[in-house]
Image (cartoon, rainbow, N blue to C red):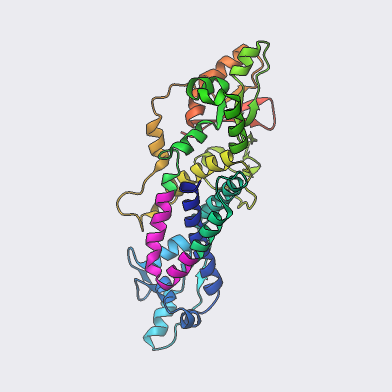
């Protein structure tokens, strides 16, 4: 909480605040006016460009345009400059897909830290320090625009370090995302101690999700599945009530309709979704990230597939809610894939089924 989560929260706040500051300062205003107060902003909009309207490869203006949505009409700018006139051309600061990713991650981490503060795992001053640092960082970038690359790379590094690929705590939470009591006994026997299980329930939000309706109480207990408030209900085109193609959503895709009311409220649910969003940040924004990443852009989603490629499972697209031993047998065959995240088990809204949505 105090390192990985808090650091990424600070980085997402920095970038979102930078975008917001640029929007407030520049959007819909003349470049000639805004550079009177902050001369360095000229580099944000035209740094590394050339007449009549060329963005050079790796130019600062192109980085800002692709990542933070800033732009001016370059032809207009260079025409006025060629006549010795002030660059009276309107500035635009639009929302980019990367900013949407950053904002989703920021909101979920904020919820995690609020819970952690209430549980005494972080202090309010830790959160306030991160907020203050983000303000200071954004101001520094405005006066030194080229430093945006360093700050963005820092955000990406911190995001990678929080994924299931590299973080043992995230990996533990990811495995608990849809876990039967049978797997707790096999992989995490300490969890079965009542005081430990109560703590995990309180801390991460783990709750009963699927309780088999069979006669044998021991088997019913073994196959009782626990989950956070994570992708808990699905219809034909929604997960958690958001209009989305499920497989795209579960590999880090953003909802087709921008949502300011993200459904996850527990620490476990929020961090599982953050993991997917970091996967999506790298997977769905490769061309943008190539502007600032030296070498190949990482793909943590593909890397995770390689880590768990030897898991054996049966393929099903849907299962009956377990009310017989035959149902449980079929569920048992797909549980290994669900455990590692190759598939997701989601209740159907419309009938008495469990949907098995495959990530790959």
Q: Quadrant of residue 20?
A: bottom right
Looking at the image, residue 209 lies above or below residue 39: above
From the viewer's side, name the closer residue of 215 and 236: 215
Looking at the image, residue 326 lies above or below residue 54: above
The extreme left residue here reads 295
Reply yes or no: does residue 152 show up in magenta: yes
The extreme bottom residue here reads 84
Reply yes or no: does residue 19 show up in magenta: no
Q: Quadrant of residue 23?
A: bottom right
The extreme top residue here reads 216
Left or right relative to 41: residue 131 = right
Task: Provide residue 359's location: percent of width, then percent of height.
Answer: 49, 34
From the viewer's side, name the closer residue of 138 and 242: 138
From the viewer's side, name the closer residue of 285 and 154: 154
Whether residue 130 can be seen here:
yes
Left or right relative to 312: residue 109 = right
Looking at the image, residue 252 lies above or below residue 289: above
Residue depicted at 52% across the width and 41% down the height: 248
Task: Provide residue 270's location: percent of width, then percent of height.
Answer: 57, 43
Task: Provide residue 22's location: percent of width, then percent of height.
Answer: 51, 69
From the viewer's side, name the closer residue of 273 and 62: 273
Residue depicted at 37% across the width and 33% down the height: 306
Whether residue 252 can be seen here:
no
Residue depicted at 56% across the width and 23% down the height: 192
User: Total label count?
Assistant: 0
Task: Provide residue 284's location: percent of width, then percent of height.
Answer: 45, 48
Look at the magenta stretch and give its main secondary structure. Answer: helix
User: What's drawn in magenta, residue-wise?
Assistant: 136-158
């Amino acid at each position: 909480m105090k390192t990985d989560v808090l650091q990424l929260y600070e980085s997402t706040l920095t970038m979102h605040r930078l975008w917001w500051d640029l929007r407030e300062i520049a959007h819909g205003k003349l470049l000639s006016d805004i550079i009177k107060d902050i001369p360095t902003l000229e580099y944000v909009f035209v740094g590394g460009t050339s007449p009549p309207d060329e963005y050079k490869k790796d130019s600062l203006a192109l980085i800002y345009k692709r990542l933070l949505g800033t732009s001016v009409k370059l032809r207009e700018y260079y025409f006025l400059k060629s006549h010795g006139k002030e660059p009276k051309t309107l500035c635009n600061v639009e929302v980019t897909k990367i900013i949407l990713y950053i904002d989703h991650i920021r909101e979920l981490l904020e919820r995690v830290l609020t819970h952690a503060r209430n549980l005494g795992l972080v202090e309010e001053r830790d959160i306030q320090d991160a907020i203050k640092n983000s303000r200071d960082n954004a101001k520094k970038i405005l006066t030194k625009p080229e430093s945006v690359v360093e700050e963005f790379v820092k955000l990406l590094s911190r995001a990678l370090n929080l994924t299931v690929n590299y973080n043992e705590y995230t990996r533990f939470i990811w495995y608990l995302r849809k876990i039967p009591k049978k797997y707790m006994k096999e992989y995490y026997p300490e969890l079965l101690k009542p005081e430990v299980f109560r703590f995990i329930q309180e801390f991460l939000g783990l709750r009963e999700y699927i309780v088999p309706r069979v006669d044998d109480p021991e088997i019913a207990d073994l196959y009782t599945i626990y989950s956070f408030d994570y992708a808990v209900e699905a219809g034909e085109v929604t997960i958690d009530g958001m209009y989305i193609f499920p497989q795209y959503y579960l590999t880090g895709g953003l909802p087709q309709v921008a949502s300011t009311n993200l459904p996850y409220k527990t620490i476990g649910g929020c961090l599982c979704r953050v993991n997917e969003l970091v996967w999506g940040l790298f997977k769905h924004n490769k061309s943008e990230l190539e502007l600032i990443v030296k070498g190949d852009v990482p793909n943590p989603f593909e890397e995770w597939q390689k880590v768990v490629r030897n898991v054996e499972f049966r393929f099903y697209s849907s299962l009956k809610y377990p009310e017989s031993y035959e149902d449980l047998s079929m569920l048992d065959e797909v549980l290994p894939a669900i455990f590692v995240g190759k598939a997701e088990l989601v209740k159907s809204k419309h009938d008495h089924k469990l949907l098995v949505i495959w990530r790959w």
